Each structure stands twice: as structure tokens, then as C-alpha cells.
Amino acid sequence: MSDPASRQLVVFSLESEEYALPIGAVHEIIRFTEPRAVASDATWIRGVIALRGLDALRELANIGSGNARIALSGMLGRAVDISVPTAQVLPLAEAVHAAGDGEQLTTGIRLGIVGDLTGTVVLLLPPADADAMCRMLGVEPDDDFALSALGEIGNIVGASYITALAGMVGVEMEPTPPATTTDRLAAIVESVLADHAHGGDLALMLDSDLTVEGEDCSISFLLVPDQGGVDLLLSRIGLG
Amino acid sequence: MIVRENMVRMGELAASGTPGHVLVSLGLGSCIGLALLDRRARIAALAHIVVPAADGQAAENPRKFADLALPELLDAVQELGAGRMRLEAVVVGGASMFMVASGSLDVGQRNEIAVRQLLEAGGVDEELVVARELAGAVS
């Protein structure tokens, strides 16, 4: 430091008191996330948070949805935008709420994942957007083919997401045929979570959005791996 | 009157003996909302069941399993003073959300079967299930 009289400090508060640390002693500042309680005799441990793992998983979701974007764009013949994905590990009770307004009527297209890593990918979109996508494919929404058109969107978009993920992590993952439903968002998300709830109390949710340019029409994606799948993903990218 | 709503989310359970107190579960899907009530004593409890059976699985939260939630639900209402013989049940949920042509039962159907059998075994007979809304999805 050039001037011994001047020091750079990081100031923070604990309860109502202010503290300062020399900036050289601060390695990193991260956004606060609510820690998960752990069973421990040490009363000063409030819980644990997943730090690096979530960043890496978000990056995986980014690559998966990038591939899905290309597939959807090719299918509809239109430009598609992509959002920055979010990755969250949450207790089941909170996971449903994190997916959005549970009362919204939503169309869900679900694909199972089989192979080394098992889980579910579900594409979620407002029913009006589902109708719009059908029309872009030349199918009227009330037509008998509408459901299979949506299934086909799920197939192409979901499969490209899964394939990109599998290729990057280096595991076998195959999509199962799509199934479609329209119901309240909470009911759909709960049911997807319930399929994987047996082995643990936490859900990993990787969430990304695709928006069709100029159509105000978007799909969000939710990947929910089985409990073992989270560990497999993390160990494959060297963080397990 | 101030109505206190108590949200019972996935794998949660709540009981109350306070008139006007509301226990709520939303968006059940394949999960099951199982309520036990003693109308005379004005006591109710609600469990939001996620999967049918623990099968020896150790979990931080046993309440998500039908087979572990029901005994706790029975204890909860009786602790508040409900009479075992006066208990009635309400069972909602257990939807097959995604129609897939497959031979195996989905989690919604398995939840429904498990809850029905457990109620019977716990002495809450079929005719004491005063309301039910099971299976099926909105559309």
C-alpha cells in the first residue's frame, strides 16, 4: 500500500453493530441464501449452503437450454431468446412456491429421463402460449392433433436439452415419450416433485426460459433429477 | 372474526382445535390432502402426503410418507382431545397428472390406494370418509 495512512476496508454489520475488515482479508462476497439446517451439536452452525455446485449446475442448464433454443427455433422457423437459468436446491415444501404462481392454469409437457441419470424434464407454458405454438406449427389448438403437436415440441425441445446435458456430463441419459396435461401450476410441479420425493427431502430445480421473438410466447423448463442424480451430476463435473 | 390460515405444504402436517382456524393445502396434484375431524370437539388435522410408503427409507421428514403421516395425524387430533370413535376423514388429491399408457400405477394412484388402506387399518372405515375428491386432473 502506497499511503500507510489510508486503508481500504470492507464494512459490514452484525446485528446492530458495524465492523470492518481490511480488504485483503476478504476473499469473496456472496449473496445471502437461507442456509439449510443440519443436525449438529455446534450451536454456532446455522446450516449449510450449496455454493460452487449451484453455479456449475446453472452452467449445465445454460448449455442444455441453449441446445433446446436451437431446436425450438428450427422447429418453429423463428428466432428464440433464452434467459439465464436459475438453479435452486430447496426443501420440497418450498420448491413448489419457487416455481411460480401456483394457481396459474398451466400446460405441462413432461418427459422422463432414463439411463445413468434419472429424473424428469417438464416444459411449462401458459395455455394461451401453448395454443400460439400449435398455430405456429400449423395446427389449430382445438384440433385433435394439438396434443400431439405439443408432445412433439416437448420431444424435440426436451430431448435436445437432455442430450446436451448428457454429452457435457458424459453420462447416458435418454428421454421417454412426452405426456401433456393442463392444470394449476402447483399441481403439476408437485406431481413432478412427488415422483422423485421418495429418496430425500430436497429438490434440485434447474429452471430456464425460452421466448419466441415477436410472439410474446414463452416456455419455461424445469429439470428435476432423482436424488442420486444430483450427486452424479456434481461428481461428474468434479464437485461431488 | 380474524381467520387464521395455516398453509400445509408438501410433506407438512398441522392440527387445530380453534374454531375459525383454517388448514389449507393448495395444488395437490398427485399428492393427497388427508384431513381428520372430530366435529363435536371441533378438532381437525391435515396432512399433505407426497408418497405412499417409506419402505424403510430414513428421511428427515417422515410426514411426506402416507404410512408415517397417518399415525402422527391420529396422535395429533387425539392429543387435542378428539375422540377416536368420532373421527371422520376427508381425502382429496391423488391425481394422475400425466396420462401415459403404461402398465404400472403412477404415484397419484399409489397414494390413493395407500391412504385408503391405512385409514381402514387405522379404524377410520370407508363410511367415515365424509368427502373425497380423488384422481383426475382439471382437464
Image (tube, coloured by chain):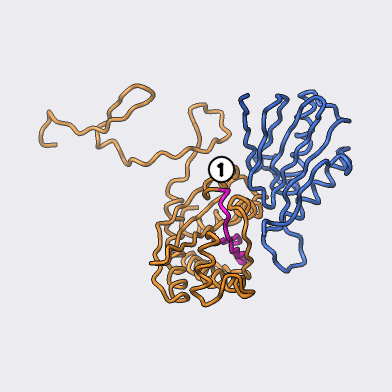
Q: Can you give x and y, in whole percent of width and height, for residue A168 in the image?
A: 46, 66
Query: Would you place residue B137 above or below residue B20 in this image?
Result: below
For the point 71% across and 39% down, the residue is B47
Residue A113 falls within the magenta-colored stretch? yes
State which quadrant residue B78 falls in: top right
B4 or A44, which is in the foreground?
B4
Query: Would you place residue A142 above or below residue B20 in this image?
Result: below
Q: Secondary structure at mark 1?
A: helix
Give the chain ID for the orange colour: A
Residue range corresponding to the magenta coloring: A102-123
Q: Chain of mark 1?
A: A
Query: Looking at the magenta stretch, what is its main secondary structure?
Result: strand
A65 or B15, which is in the foreground?
B15
Query: Would you place residue B74 above or below residue B109 in this image?
Result: above
Question: Is A68 positioned to the left or the right of B41 in the image?
Answer: left
Q: Can you give x and y, in whole percent of width and height, for residue A166 in the image?
A: 51, 67
For the point 67% across and 60% down, the residue is B139
Q: Where's the N terminus of chain A, which quadrant?
A: top left
Q: Which residue is mark 1?
A: A94
* Callout count: 1
Residue B25 falls within the magenta-colored stretch? no
Q: Chain B takes which shade in the image? A: blue
Report whether residue B20 is seen.
Answer: yes
Question: Is A189 positioned to the left or the right of A215 in the image?
Answer: right
For the point 62% across and 32% down, the residue is B5
Report whether residue A227 is seen.
Answer: no
For the point 40% across and 68% down, the residue is A80
Q: Residue furthest left?
A: A3
Query: Would you place residue A8 above or below residue A210 in this image?
Result: above
Q: Can you give x and y, in whole percent of width and height, for residue A74 in the image?
A: 44, 76
Q: Can you give x and y, in whole percent of width and height, for residue A59 in the image?
A: 42, 58
Report the amino acid beneath label 1. Answer: Glu
